[in-house]
Amino acid sequence: MRSGDTAAKADAANDVAANAASSASPPARRHPNDLTLPSWHPLSDSNLSELSVAVSPPFSLAAARISSSPNSMASSSSAAASAAALEAVQVLVASLADDAPRVRDSALAALRDVAPLNPLLVLDCCATISRGGHRRFANMAGVFLVMASAVRALDRLDAEREFLRKIAKIATAEIVSSKDFNVDWQRAAATLLVAIGSHDPDLMMGEIFLYFSGPTSALPAMLQILADFASAEALQFTPRLKDVLLRVLPILGSVRDGQRPVFANAFKCWCQAAWLYIGDASSGLPFDDDVMSFMNSVFELLLKVWTGSRDLKVRLSSVEALGEMVGLVTRSQLKSALPRIIPAMLDLCKKDQEVAFTAAHSLHNLLNVSLLSESGPPLLEFEELNVVLITLLPLASFNNSKDERLYVSKGLKTYNELQHCFLVIGLVYPEDLCLFLLSKCRSKDEASIVGALGTIKHLLPRLLESWHTKQTLLVEIVKSLLEEQSLGIRMALAELIVVMASHCYLSGHPAELAVEFLVRHSAITDDDLNDLNTLKNEYFQDKRFEMKMSLAGLSDLRAVCEKSLLLLAITIPEMELVLWPFLLQLIIPKKYTGAVATVCKCITELCRHKLSQTNPLYTEFNASNEMPSPEYLFARLLVLLHNPLARGQLATQILTVLCYLGPLFPRNLSLFWEDEVPKMKAYISDPEDLKQDSTYQETWDDMILNFFAESLDVVNDNVWVISLGDAFARQYDLYATSDGHSALLHRCLGMLLQKVDDRIYVREKIDWMCRHSSMSIPVNRLGLAQGIGLVAASHLDTVLEKLKNILENAGQSALQRLLSFFSFREKVEDVDDTYAALALMYGYAARYAPSTVIEARINALVGTNMLGRFLHVQHPTAKQAVITAIDLLGRAVISAAEMGISFPLKRRDQLLEYVLTLMGRDQSDDLVDFSIELLQTQSVALSACTTLVSIEPRLPLETRNRVMKATLGFFALPTEPSNIVESLITNLIILLGAILLTSGEDGRSRAEQLLHILRQLDPYVSSSAEHQREGDGGSRSLSSLPSAFVLPNRDSLSLGERVMSYLPRCADTDDEVRKVAIQIIALFFNISLSLPKQKAANDIDLESSYGALSSLVDIVSVIRRKASVDQIEVFHRVVSSVCILLSREELVVLLHSCTLATCDKVKQSADGSIQAIIVFIIRRGKDLREADVLRTTQSLLSSAVTLTDKHSRQEVLNAISCLAENTNHIVVFDEVLFVAGRDICTKDISRIRGGWAIQDVFYAFSQHKVLATRFLEYILFILHKEPVATNDSEKGENNSESSADDSILQATIFALNAFLRGGGKIGKQAVEQSYPSVLSALILKLGDLHSLAELGRNELLRSLLIAFRSFCDCVGDVEMGKILARDGEQTEKEKMIDLVQEVACSSSVKRPKEVLPTCAILSKSLNRNQRAEREAAAAALSEFIRHSEKEPALLEQIVEELCQHVTDDSPTVRSLCLRGLVQIPESHMLKYIQQVLGVILALLEDANESVQLTAVQCLLTVLNVSEQDAVEPILISLLVRLRNLQISMNTKMRSNAFAAYGALSSYGVGSQHHAFLEQIHATLPRLILHLHDKDLSVRLACRNAFQLLAPSMEVEGLSSLLNKQYFTYDRRSDYEDFIRDLTRQLCRLSPARVDSYLESAIQAFDAPWPIIQANAVCLVSCMLSFLDDQRFLAPYFSQVFAMLVGRMSQSPEAVVRASASSAMGLLIKRSNMLKPSSSQFDRVDPSQSSQHGDLHAKTSSEHQEENTVKPDGASQGEQ
């Protein structure tokens, strides 16, 4: 509540109190049950007293009629009822200001229902409460709406003028007295006055006219009321317009600017009403001369004064009003006003969109009236309209903007209104308007030009016939604007061109210019949009470009032009003569390159249509000499294919159009394309897939080149080929040298020259290619070299001659080069570029030249040391080019050898030196620069070295060492950038392979070569850096062990560690590594056995050891002979020998240090190490002590954690399992569980890379035939240990465990989960055998951990639930798994109990044979100290008992256990025991029914509410199987206890109590029937009230109980009432409808019981639930409204009314106040207390009104006095 409203209401209360004191009426006595509310409350005493005191004159008429009625005066009860009804109306009126919207709505609806009964009384009350105005009453809008409804309900007799005048004065006085402007209440007041006006327009308007005599702040509101009345009652208002104008005109001159918009709006509404009247009336305008004079005066005032105001709102509203008035004034006045009104409207049209739309609409109306009137000629000549057109044209250009971010809808509406104005002018002066628009197109003003073009586009289809003669002028204007620089003009032109073409305005040369305009702007590329200089120079040469340019606008312009081109080609048949073959000409120019895709689309569409006609395509093409030749077209389109990802699917469109243009080319070529083009289109059909291939561009260019070569072969026409070559040559200027298109053009021309025999022609074109190339650009340089190389395939000598000339011209002396280096860096780079290009051209010439002729040329090239000149290049790309050229020379030699023409490459070693020099490596091994360019150069150099060492002659030793020294250091490179480094390393490996293959003359020398390389690799293999060890050749260095050395003792050899280090190499993937490793191990043991015997080796059996060593020697001999042997068998024999040769201490050390070996980088080596360890454990596990087992377990676990490869880890897991099987398994299990607990506490095991290794260990144990059962027993043993700490003391014991124990417990749960999840068949079999133990342990631990979850420790519970679900999956109990997944993580104890019971039920259904052993384990658990475990055991037993039907002994035992624990100190255990008792199988229930019912009856009064709830629920269950004899003795006791529980605050308790009450209906027969019936009727009101309880379950239970009890109530028709739909709906309106029908039935059929019903329902007024209070109010009001017997009605009616008016209407709950309002309205409506005694009342003198007020106040006070004594129990709450 706002502070201002509070203060205002307090003031109102004080004023009302003063009035009451001055009237000398006795104070009203407060009802005993009335609440004391603050004074600001709408229903407080201070506000209600305003309605209770005398109704001040002149509004006491209705009260006087009631009190003076003969009937009412005859009986005091009738007077009291009338007074109470009046007070209720007052309360309803006061409730209109309630804070809650639903209360206000209910009060408003009630008053509107009451109003037709006595509208005068409602009007009186509303008038009284409105005396203070909106300052004292917050919701004056509601009051006025009620009064409006009452006024509408007045009949003709009551709607007397004086009475309506008094009501009108209320609304007008409120408006006059208020300086605030509130839309809601002023609108409501206007509604009231409009309602009065519908009865008496003159009266209403007269009241309003009273305020027109002088200045008042309410004048605008009054005018607005008249405007609203005119809009609502146009037929009644229009004849009275003269009176309105008579009052308004005198004050118009003094109206301030702030009020003028209201006046103008009123004039607008009045004029609209007049137009409605004219449209409805048949006699025309009902205005006399005076009205017309008044209208003219208003028109003049608005025009001459108000439209000149500085206030924009005044000007706008005036213009809007004038727009409606122009048709109502005389034509002469309108004509004279036009010079003023048009400029005013035009000025507003220039404002923002909101203002411009209103002004444009008014202007449209003005032009309609002025130009298209039927009563005379146009009032404006076209010359007079020039100013309109000049003003509107620029506005049309702005509104024509396509910017969708600003004023989209309003801007479009404004644009349409402007075009409507143009259309009106065009309909009258079509030719003049056309000439005007054309002249504006010639102006210099951009906005006018754009507006004119947009207007022509809009009007051309509508004025087509009128403008037909101006076609030539329009075309000329368009031609003149095609070169305009303005973006807006270009956009407008693009749109206009399509409209003109569609109406046949374009043909011939102008049409071609228009098409060229569209193509030119379709050619704007994305690169152009990002390059302002290109746009400025090529598209917009205007100096104002920077200021006006918009990239978004350019993009839109391009899109519009592209769309326009397609429309011309597809939808306008007349344009075919223009477009074909003109579009072919637009493909060639460079400036139209960006539009080629769109042009090809258009040509394709045209060709599709042309091919269906008789006129051949080729004939039409030849008819024009200006068109490009087919060869020129083909050359252009072929090169444009270069980019397969170009915008608009350029490549696809070109291939498509080539097929359609096939008739233009040789026939064979067209047929060839039909087969090849679909293949090429398929390759580029999916751009996203194409981008995934990094070499797609190279592949695509090769496809284009092959396509071109095959096309030339198919043509086989030398003349045509030469013509095509000339076309290629002339197109170099069309492409930038930095673009890939230029490179492709070089290659295409080179391929064409390869097919030409004319040597002179070839030489000319080679010169042309070189002149039009840019050797400084790598792409262009490479394309030129490839093109020259393609020429060399047929003209090698010509090419070499040309290259020699270039080389001679490009040469410089060393001094010149040095000087240029110091002076101009650019000159050095120019020389580098020339040499790079020459080198590439030599290389590709050799690569493509015929193998039969290249030997002499290559030898000459190399022999003259020509390539030596290229060594001084400095730029990395130039170096790469020279290296590539050398590589190409070598490849040419290899290709020749493959063709059978083998020859050695002279100075091959010198070429290798060249490559190593260009590679950037000196004699040192230091790598200083790892830049990307250098790495790329080195990668290319390695590839060239591989090529060179692969050719004859064989590589000398010195050269080999030089190459290896320069390249092997690359193994030390870092891994980034990965793509370049990986390529470089790959090339290095290939190089080393090539050296091995080509160096050495026999096997021995090659072996030496290999050993040398391996020795060089050893330092990198043994490096600590991982990327240097990836070669994995470090073990090869061990082959260089010296032959003579000092023998150490055996201990110093550390055989355990040494053997474990070299054993992985025995299983290496490399044969040589394996051989060396085996030799080393044999050497070690040979040394060790040659040593003297030592104390630490007493356990060594020398005989066995020498036998094992002999076996090793044999293996070495075999592998040295390179015999074909099984490597696995060799490794196993090595392991067996080592197992024998190791002493116990050495074996222990080996096992302790096995981690590195098992995690070897080579997977095969790691797997071999693990297999060796397994063999060691199996054969010598008995030699290990517990400490040895522990340390070995730790090492293996470390290996398992380190390994991420699944197979390798699995092998380690097998080793751990083997260790547990062959040694002490408890030690292994303890260590694994300890490590698991430590990991859980210290790591996030869910994010460990490769998965958690310990979990895999658990899997391995569960899948082991021997260990599975042992491990499961071990886990269950850990679970059955002392439970975790819970911070509570139970049965005298306080448990506590350390965090370490918690971690072990969590690890145990994880282990169990892993066992159940990954055990496979073996683990499943173990679980099946131990099913009862596992299930019992899980259930008990579930209860134990739920107690932790209630304390916020949920981790263990979540882990256990996962394990439990795994158990379900393991044993195949899908239902149990679903139960756990659904409800497992609920932390509430009730949810846990339900979960355990559902689990037990599922287990019983799936495995009935396991119930007996499971129950035996759980029964013992009922005596455990932990309460949570007892609860879990009781929950499970309460469910298992259902499935013990076939085990009577077990059933009796369970029943005995449950009965013993019914008195447990845990309420949960008591409840569960009771639940278990009611779950006894039906076949045995009769035996125990008396015992069960006795327990239920006792627990219904248990001190714990949850136990009571359980008892009620169990009662519902037992009643289904109980017999009459068992229930009848305790029936009434059960009903009484259930009634006490029906008012519980617990919703479950209430719902179950009502449900049980209904379930007892079947037992209410026999001797207990009468008592049962009395109980039902005593409970019926409560049942009815809770049918709409706030809780759904209570509602459903009450409905069901009602349906069950209905047949026993002996009320006719009650059952049919319950079958209606509203009985089952939850909407409050449906519930109230049901209450009304039900109370009607009860009052009619059971009137004797209504008294008790009312007493119970009235008691519910004090219920603790607001919704029940509201239901009670509704029920009582309905019963009172339908009760006809006054003997019953009298005692309650006044009491209920007093409570509704007092306490209930003042409730803090909105739903109660709303129900009270509806109830008061219902009671008033159903009774006759408000109905006047006669249809016509005598009017009362105002002086008597105070007497009536006193009488009314006295009656109300007496009425409250009589109600101070209430019926028994009325003040008590519902109990």
Image (tube, rainbow, N blue to C red):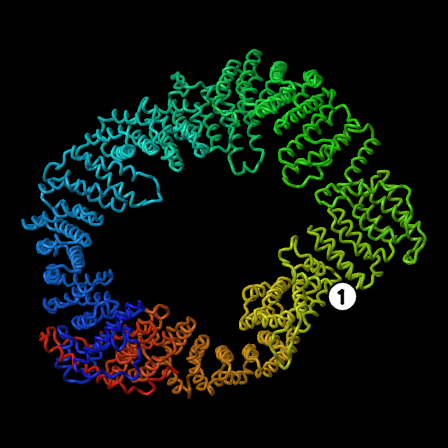
The reply to whether residue 621 is visible in this rendering is yes
**1462 shown above or below 633:** below
User: In the picture provided, is 377 more to the left or to the right than 844?
Assistant: left
The residue nearer to you, when weighing 1085 against 199, is: 1085
**1227 shown above or below 837:** below
- Please give the name of the residue rendered at 70% of the width and 25% of the height, measured from the top-left corner: 914
**1032 shown above or below 1592:** above
Q: Residues within 10 Å of mark 1 (few under 14, many from 20)?
A: some
On the rendered image, what quadrant is the C terminus found in? bottom left
Residue that label 1 marks: 1226
User: In the picture provided, is 644 more to the left or to the right than 1033?
Assistant: left
Q: Position of residue 382 (x, y in %)?
A: 16, 33
Q: Residue lying at the far left in this picture: please name it.
A: 289
Q: Amino acid at mark 1?
A: Ile
Q: Position of residue 44 (x, y in %)?
A: 27, 76
Q: Quadrant of residue 341?
A: top left
User: In the picture provided, is 703 more to the left or to the right than 434?
Assistant: right
- Please give the name of the residue rendered at 39% of the width and 22% of the height, measured from the top-left corner: 581
Q: Quadrant of residue 105?
A: bottom left
Q: Position of residue 261 (x, y in %)?
A: 19, 52
On the rendered image, what quadrant is the N terminus found in? bottom left
Disc 1 is placed on an element classified as: helix
The residue nearer to you, when weighing 877 against 1452, is: 877
Q: Position of residue 360 (x, y in %)?
A: 22, 43
| Number of marks present in the image shown | 1
The reply to whether residue 570 is visible in this rendering is no
